[in-house]
Amino acid sequence: MTNFGNNNSSIKTILAEKGLDSNGKYLRKQLDKICTNDVEKALSAPVGTYNFNKLLALISPAAEDYLEQMAQLAHQLTIQRFGPTIRLYAPLYLSNYCSNSCCYCGFNKDNKSERTRLTIDQALAEADIIASEGFRDILLVSSEDRQFISVDYLVELAGKLRGKFASISIEIYQLSCDEYARLFKAGIEGVTLYQETYDREAYRYYHPSGPKSDYDNRLRTPENIASAGMREVGLGVLLGLTDWRVEALALAEHAHYLIKRYWQSHVSFSFPRLRPAPEVGSSQFKHLLCDKNLVQMITALRLCFADAGLVLSTRERAQLRDHLVKLGITKFSAGSKTNPGGYSGRCKATEQFEIDDNRNPAQVAAMIRQQGFEPVWKDWDIAFIK
Amino acid sequence: MEVLKINGKEKQFPDGIPKTLVELLKLLDINQATVVAEVNGKIIERQNFSQTQLRNGQKIELVRFVGGG
Amino acid sequence: MSKLIIAGREFHSRLLIGTGKFASCELMAEAIERSGTEIVTVALRRVDIENENDDILSAIDRNHYLLLPNTSGARDADEAVRLAKLARAATGINWLKLEVTPDPYYLLPDPVETLKAAEILVKDNFVVLPYINADPILAKKLEDAGTATVMPLASPIGSNQGLKTRAALEIIIEQANVPVVVDAGLGLPSHAADAMEIGADAVLVNTAIATAADPPEMAEAFKLAVEAGRMAFESGMPSISKRASASSPLTGFLRET
């Protein structure tokens, strides 16, 4: 909706003006002031449309008493827009050699981890296993390994995967607009890139070195993705690094910004929640979210973004994932291996994080059906346009 | 007989066509301050009306503002 | 109330007035004044050689009102571009309401020719305000092409039917990065207020005022309606209660742990 004036500010300015890139003390005060009237007003606002103050109310502590109502509305809205369906995808890790030293990650270059990277043929072998499970939607993941997992490598891999997979997306280090355009031409249609945290100070702390340590460059990248023509843009924060309520607001502003400027790109939200990983202890992290918080964030975002994809990975335990099927989530990974070569088991490389839903894809699909939803393996086909 | 096609209609000038656009407008009793002119498809700026020489057979469009939504 | 900003220029009034169909220039001038408008549209037509008419421009003080020529009569992009250039030559200003209406019955705008003309005119430094059907995709494409606003219709010109295209208008308003001016079909002040309440940035009214029994009075009524609608919108519309019909509880599991 209108801001009562033309707004051509950059996302950097918008976040700064709203206090979303600093420690959130001011916003925390605003959140604590939210009362039941504000929450009820937010719930009566047109469902599925975004407004900063509406999300502020829905994400507040006061809204915790309204979770059931938020869940019901989110459920109904998601069914209206997506039908009772859950899309399934699998991640294919290509490398865990990394030039970054992100504190929270198993692939941190300073960790003593088993490193490996896949050749094109090895990647194709992993992809075959993934395809044999039924997947037609694949996410190519890599650490900051530019030299090996280069744009040329990805172009070649995408070309060879196109016959097997209807949808190929990537989650890798930042690229330029031209590089994304090359990848789009090669058949990659979506890019996921988490800001991890919108809080500048926290960002500096958790990303001390490497190319990923540049906050502004990271922040600008989703725009490069969208302007390169990618159909899907995946956003997210690593929940648990800082105050999740403030991060949810920043994430929403970023999404809203992209949706207004790049009207042909579809935005999705992911919810990676800090989980234990080898050499990454949970005692260092003071802002961990409980399940109730996660449910509030998912439903609040659904109530503000009727058509956004909401993606949940196998980081989360099985029982929680089952309950979230009806709370607005639209996409699940299943049977994931977060280490390169993990599907074939041919090498013992370190995982990025521990999986907590160890069911195989068929079991996950069965659970989805049991809840009255349809597991969707493929909802697009490049054959439609080529 | 010399003619000019003005606003789609042929008009004959037994005494010869006016030499310039300004003279044509005076002849037709049209206020030049509010009219826009096109000669053979080319828009003539108002300051050039007096310098614009007319030739036999040219197509002239004279347009002005009227009420509209 | 906030100001309306079009192409970097500020306006207090969110009511634009069309000057067609008035019984006389005097009535038109008085209605314009009572409306509080700052933007007035006019059309271009061939001078009638045989008859001298009132010159409309003498009744509109260009020091007070921004003249917005329209390209009504154009049936394709080429004609619209030609009219645009004539208008610019006449006024020396480059603001333009782009109107391409090949259909003489409902005067509905041609989306393809409008987009084509808009692209040409924006490149030629016109400030283009395109009149369109309430098509959200077309609105985005025109915005991408660089138009200063979009002007979706509420219902066909002169039909006075109000917001027949309401649902589409709401989408356009939600998605637009340029001002949205609801134009055509607003027959009552309450229609104009309605358009402002759903978030339109401005409205354009012609027939309802020009053909009223007392045009200046009706002009003022529209002025008040636009102000009321905008004030309501800016103060935050009150909520309409919605109760979700609970089937079985979805968050019970959170209490189990």
Image (cartoon, coloured by chain):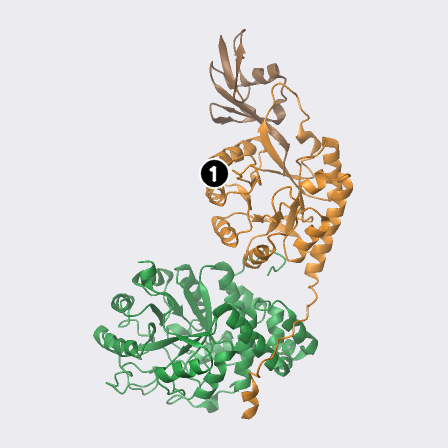
Chain colours: A green, B brown, C orange
- The residue most toward the left is A121
Tell me the residue that label 1 is attached to: C77
Where does the image place residue A297, in percent across and percent down from the top left? Answer: 54, 78
| Whether residue A176 is situated above or below residue B23 in the rendered picture | below
- Of residue A171 and residue A362, the one placed in the foreground of this image is A362
Where does the image place residue B44, in percent across and percent down from the top left? Answer: 52, 25
Badge 1: how crowded within 10 Å, few (<14), some, or many (20+)?
many
Asked if one can make out residue A335 in the rendered structure from this viewpoint, the answer is no
Where does the image place residue A347, in percent across and percent down from the top left? Answer: 25, 86
Residue drawn at x 31%, y 61% as measured from the top left: A383
- Residue A80 lies left or right of residue C68; in this view the side is left
Element type where label 1 sits in the image: helix
Chain of the residue where label 1 is placed in the rendered structure: C
**In which quadrant of the rendered image does the N terminus of chain A lie?**
bottom right
| Whether residue A320 is situated above or below residue B2 in the rendered picture | below
Quadrant of the image occupied by residue C171: bottom right
